[in-house]
């Protein structure tokens, strides 16, 4: 319970006191209203939202005698204005504004219903008591008639009396005012001939006929009538049968309450709950409801189509021309979509610049594609907003499926993903749903969303690929390569998730884990093999070089494992050092100062200016595997000269050189001939477990059997 709840309850109490007679003290009133406030907040934030909570609150207000003429209006206005602020940050997926609107509508309906029930019961009881008393005795009849006439005349609700044939015998002043007829005009009318509305359900008059036959004593319903001036009014009507002394039907009495204003308020609130206030289109809530209706019925062979539309470059309009221009643009787009789609499909604004079109009972995907073509053509004409002429395009995701093959959430998700594919393909177009491609996108989303938790659950592990010294074929180092043992997709290599980790920022946590685990393994090897233990090389992503804690993490990990900094080599690509930001270079300089080895990976595939290499704090160049492919080709001499030049340059800068991708003895021989210091590739060993590296370390000469072919 917060101070805000109490302040709201106190303001509500003041509104009620000013409009109603309240038979309780102020402290009790504040406590009761505080309970009402708590109920509204809990209902609005509930996981399973139930609009009936608002209706019950309206009933409770009447039960508490908060029934002044202005009480409902003041209360609804206060709730609509104040309640959204009490909700704070609503949980994801909760439409707080829509829920508030539905609660307000429910309160109005519950209040009106309870007030009507109380009034009808009181008036009906008084009237029926008068009728019974008149039959009991002549003396009592006169008194009862006086009481009845007073009630009949002064009643705030309309009362009409008709015979069994529907001829109106009497109508009190309230009913005359309600319909705009005089007493004489009323007594010339017949219920069944002049009081029928064209939209009346057949059940209304069937129920009335049952009562006239004596099969029921009363019924209640909500019904429309026409006034004498042609305007419509909504009423809550209660019709009762009056029997004679023998119990046979004698005539009928109708009690009518004018609820036109309440009905208009309810319709307005319902409209607000299901429509976008800016464009007037249906909103997300209405889309959810419509899809629920489509999928609730028998599926059979029924089909449904959906277009998910997003404006291209709308953010630029907002940022450059202002939100007022953006709002006018959205209104025009909404108008064009409505005109293009006609009365059949549901056109809705999902929020921002996203729109949805739902097409029911399609026959095939061509139906939806044709509509998408029409939408694109409609959007082609420039839109003028004030002094600005704007060219607006849209990317559209098109989905058309059998109802039995999907569900509302899956349909929306498929269209959303397909729309982003249209954007990726160049915008200003539509893309058709492709199950395989969408599955790939969903898989990427799934991996990205679960990666951080997977690090914490220990689903990642390392494999190690040997780095061999070409001079004596000894094992000098290993490269740590991360793998993901995913519970659903199996073992995944880094190509499946490293880019996702970089996009989501998880690469920072994952990279820290790889560093820690690799250094722990080096400690194990040093304890077992001493000076023969290899150093470990770990890849650094560009994002990690922008992490302020990197140097501190590396220092602490080395201390935790009792390692010399030279036991660790960090690999980075040229991409990580491109740009004007000096942060990565500063970070590398600090790591170099610690004594950690720094290697430039995949050298030769980027755009690095060679003279700038001398400015980098490097220990090693790792030549891209494309050079190994070149040395294997018949025209290898050019590649061999290039590699020789790179090796000479690196040695001049006091850098060692490792050749990647060595798969054949011929490649090994040619890299050795130009002076490469180390090699890595499947010729030596593919990536493997730490135990496989143990076996290599135990061998006297791990790769001594390898020899180069003739050059």
Image (tube, rainbow, N blue to C red):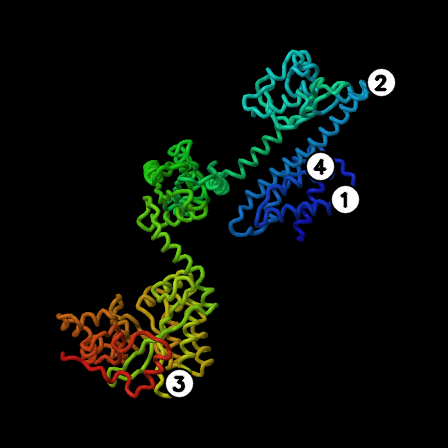
Q: Position of residue 251 (x, y in %)?
A: 70, 18
Is 419 situated left or right of 235 in this image?
A: left
The residue singled out by tag 2 in the image is 137
Is 627 above or below relative to 264?
below
Is 98 above or below relative to 441?
above
Is 282 above or below relative to 682?
above
Disc 4 to disc 2, how far (Cα)?
A: 38 Å
The residue singled out by tag 4 in the image is 62
- Comparing marks 4 and 2, which lies closer to the viewer? 2
State which tag comes first along the sequence, 3 or 4: 4
Does the image show residue 367?
Answer: yes
State which tag comes first along the sequence, 2 or 3: 2
Q: Secondary structure at mark 3?
A: helix
The residue singled out by tag 3 in the image is 526
Q: Secondary structure at mark 4?
A: helix
State which tag comes first along the sequence, 4 or 1: 1
Q: Position of residue 641 (x, y in %)?
A: 16, 74
The residue singled out by tag 1 in the image is 26
Residue at x-position 68% and y-position 45%: 36
């Amino acid at each position: 319970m917060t101070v805000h709840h109490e302040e709201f309850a106190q303001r509500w109490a003041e509104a009620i006191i000013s409009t109603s007679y309240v038979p309780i003290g102020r402290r009790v009133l504040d406590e009761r209203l505080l309970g009402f406030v708590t109920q509204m907040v809990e209902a609005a934030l509930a996981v399973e939202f139930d609009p009936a909570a608002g209706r019950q609150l309206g009933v409770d207000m009447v039960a508490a005698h908060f029934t002044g003429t202005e009480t409902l209006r003041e209360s609804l206005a206060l709730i609509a204005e104040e309640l959204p602020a009490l909700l704070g940050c609503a949980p994801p997926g909760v439409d707080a504004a829509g829920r508030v609107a539905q609660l307000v509508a429910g309160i109005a309906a519950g209040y009106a219903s309870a007030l009507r029930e109380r009034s009808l019961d009181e008036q009906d009881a008084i009237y029926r008591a008068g009728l019974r008393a008149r039959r009991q005795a002549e003396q009592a009849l006169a008194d009862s008639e006086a009481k009845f006439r007073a009630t009949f005349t002064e009643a705030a609700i309309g009362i009409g009396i008709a015979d069994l044939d529907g001829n109106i015998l009497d109508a009190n002043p309230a009913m005359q005012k309600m319909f705009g007829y005089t007493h004489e005009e009323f007594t010339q009318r017949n219920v069944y001939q002049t009081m029928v509305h064209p939209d009346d359900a057949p059940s209304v008059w069937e129920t009335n006929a049952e009562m006239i036959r004596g099969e029921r004593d009363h019924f209640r319903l909500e019904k429309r009538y026409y006034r004498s001036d042609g305007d419509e009014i909504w009423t809550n009507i209660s019709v009762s049968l009056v029997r004679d002394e023998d119990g046979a039907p004698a005539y009928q009495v109708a009690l009518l309450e004018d609820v036109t204003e309440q009905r208009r308020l309810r319709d307005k609130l319902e409209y607000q709950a299901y429509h976008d206030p800016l464009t007037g289109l249906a909103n997300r809530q209405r889309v959810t409801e419509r899809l629920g209706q489509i999928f609730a019925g028998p599926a059979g062979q029924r089909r449904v189509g959906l277009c998910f539309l997003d404006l291209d470059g709308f953010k630029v309009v907002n940022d450059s021309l202002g939100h007022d221009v953006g709002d006018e643009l959205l209104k025009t787009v909404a108008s064009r979509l409505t005109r293009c789609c006609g009365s059949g499909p549901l056109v809705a604004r999902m929020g921002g610049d996203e729109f949805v079109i739902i097409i029911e009972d399609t026959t095939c995907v061509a139906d939806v594609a044709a509509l998408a073509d029409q939408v694109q053509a409609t959007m082609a004409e420039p839109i003028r907003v004030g002094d600005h002429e704007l060219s607006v395009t849209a990317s559209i995701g098109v989905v058309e499926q059998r109802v039995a093959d999907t569900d509302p959430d899956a349909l929306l998700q498929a269209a959303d993903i397909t729309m982003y594919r249209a954007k990726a393909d160049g915008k200003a177009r539509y893309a058709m749903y492709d199950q395989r491609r969408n599955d790939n996108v969903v898989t990427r989303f799934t991996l990205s969303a679960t990666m951080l938790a997977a690090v914490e659950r220990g689903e990642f592990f390392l494999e190690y690929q040997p780095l061999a010294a070409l001079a004596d074929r000894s094992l000098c180092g290993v490269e740590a390569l991360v793998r993901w043992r995913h519970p659903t997709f199996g073992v995944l290599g880094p190509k499946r998730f490293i880019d996702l980790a970089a996009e989501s920022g998880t690469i920072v946590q994952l990279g820290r884990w790889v560093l820690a685990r690799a250094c722990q393994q080096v400690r194990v090897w040093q304890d077992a093999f001493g000076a023969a233990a290899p150093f470990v090389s770990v890849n650094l992503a560009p994002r990690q070089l922008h992490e302020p804690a990197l140097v501190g993490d590396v220092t602490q990990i080395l201390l935790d494992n009792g390692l010399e900094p030279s036991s660790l080599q960090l690999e980075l690509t040229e991409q990580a050092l491109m740009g004007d930001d000096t942060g990565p270079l500063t970070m590398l300089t600090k790591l170099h100062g610690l004594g950690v080895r720094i290697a430039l990976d995949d050298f030769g595939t980027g755009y690095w200016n060679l003279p700038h290499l001398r400015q980098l704090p490097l220990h090693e160049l790792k030549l891209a595997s494309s050079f190994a492919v070149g040395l294997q080709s018949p025209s290898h001499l050019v590649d061999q000269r290039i590699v020789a030049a790179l090796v000479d340059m690196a040695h001049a800068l006091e850098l060692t050189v490792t050749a990647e991708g060595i798969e054949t003895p011929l490649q090994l021989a040619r890299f050795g001939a130009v002076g490469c210091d180390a090699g890595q590739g499947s010729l030596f060993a593919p990536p493997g477990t730490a135990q496989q590296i143990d076996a290599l370390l135990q061998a006297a000469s791990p790769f001594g059997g390898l020899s180069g072919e003739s050059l």
